[in-house]
């Protein structure tokens, strides 16, 4: 355990002062050595201890060391604290288990600068305590409709999540609550557009993910979303975020909104290859440089996606 006295006052002591970190975070800290096509701008941390949830798309309840498509090794928290100035933001991701609110509060209190917390629904008083240490919060609604929410076995209820999002906006403020949505889990385009529109209407932001089949999970055989469909959602998310009427999408050239295809989320969150292999297809580009290198192909995908939106809306999107 680290000798820093701060650990005497945190609930993390029972975890021996360790936390899980993404591989990219460890590489940037100098603890792992590998070539990266894009480096993370945010330090991504995950509370150890596993998860009591049994979401069909997530491996956390099956294998604690794994989240999404990659393993998250344990690291001494003090080492991350010492290296925090290498990053523009720290993102702490919680899991669903007893005592997680106090552990995430203890961990967040150790960092200076911008901190984001990704959390499951909690009481308002816990949100207010977390607000002392974090300026933004992420909420994993994940599913894009009540139907999909039930199908993928999310804990709790759809309505309880929507109420929690509203409370979070009250506590953190408009534009500081980032709701995670996973595209390609069986939702329709109409359902996806409806929930994104509703969330922006509530004052939340959308962090868009593409579904990634993970071996060993109940959804390991479910396909990735079609890239054209995902580009449609990225375009819709961007226009909603910017407050531009969706009817005007067709009047813009894709070159005018390239940033729509970068990773969406908190400022400085670029999640390099969280959803996909660097070999492609790349759903969320972690840097503008990488997007520019691939822009000719992406531009073609976007033009096709916008045309599909035109057809789908029967002329409402012009």
Image (tube, helix red, strand yellow):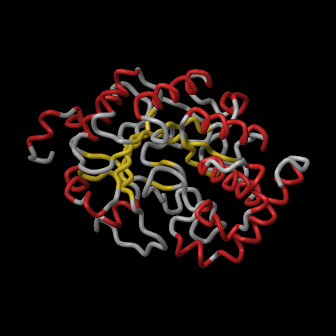
In percent of width and height, residue 17 lies at 22, 43
Considering depth in this image, is 182 or 191 the residue closer to the camera? 191
Picture quadrant where residue 185 is located:
top right
In percent of width and height, residue 20 lies at 35, 49
In percent of width and height, residue 158 lies at 62, 25
Q: Is residue 38 above or below residue 96?
A: below
Residue sitting at x 75%, y 40%: 187
Q: Is residue 215 visible?
A: no
Horizontally, residue 19 falls left or right of residue 154, namely: left
Considering depth in this image, is 239 or 106 the residue closer to the camera? 239
Picture quadrant where residue 302 is located:
bottom right
Q: Quadrant of the C terminus?
A: bottom right
Horizontally, residue 120 falls left or right of residue 17, namely: right
Residue sitting at x 59%, y 48%: 241
Report the number of numbered marks: 0
In percent of width and height, residue 299 lies at 72, 71
Q: Quadrant of the N terminus?
A: top left
Q: Is residue 167 above or below residue 93?
A: above
Residue sitting at x 54%, y 58%: 263
Q: Is residue 75 visible?
A: yes
Considering depth in this image, is 265 or 254 the residue closer to the camera? 254
Residue sitting at x 35%, y 72%: 33
């Amino acid at each position: 355990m680290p000798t820093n006295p701060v650990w005497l006052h945190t609930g993390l002591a029972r975890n021996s002062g360790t936390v899980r970190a993404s591989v990219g975070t460890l590489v940037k800290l100098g603890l792992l050595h590998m070539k990266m096509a894009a480096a993370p701008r945010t330090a991504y941390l995950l509370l150890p201890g596993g998860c009591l949830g049994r979401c069909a798309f997530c491996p956390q309840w099956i294998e604690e060391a794994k989240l999404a498509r990659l393993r998250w090794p344990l690291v001494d928290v003090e080492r991350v604290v010492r290296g925090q100035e290498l990053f523009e933001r720290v993102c702490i991701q919680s899991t669903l288990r007893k005592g997680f609110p106090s552990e995430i509060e203890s961990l967040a209190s150790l960092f200076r600068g911008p901190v984001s917390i990704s959390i499951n629904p909690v009481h308002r008083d816990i949100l207010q305590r977390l607000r002392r240490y974090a300026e933004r919060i992420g909420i994993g609604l994940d599913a894009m409709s009540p139907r999909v929410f039930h199908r993928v076995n999310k804990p709790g209820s759809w309505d309880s999540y929507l109420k929690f999002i509203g409370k979070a906006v009250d506590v953190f403020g408009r534009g500081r609550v980032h709701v995670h949505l996973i595209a390609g889990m069986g939702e329709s385009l109409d359902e996806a557009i409806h929930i994104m529109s509703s969330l922006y209407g509530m004052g939340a932001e959308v962090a868009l993910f593409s579904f990634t089949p993970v071996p060993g999970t109940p959804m390991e055989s479910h396909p990735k979303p079609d890239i054209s469909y995902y580009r449609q959602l990225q375009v819709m998310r961007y226009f909603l975020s910017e407050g531009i009427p969706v009817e005007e999408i067709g009047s813009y050239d894709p070159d005018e909104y390239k940033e729509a295809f970068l990773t969406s989320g908190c400022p400085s969150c670029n999640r390099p290859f969280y959803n996909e292999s660097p070999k492609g297809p790349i759903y969320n580009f972690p840097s503008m440089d990488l997007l520019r290198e691939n822009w000719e192909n992406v531009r073609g995908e976007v033009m096709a996606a916008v045309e599909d939106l035109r057809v789908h809306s029967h002329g409402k999107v012009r």
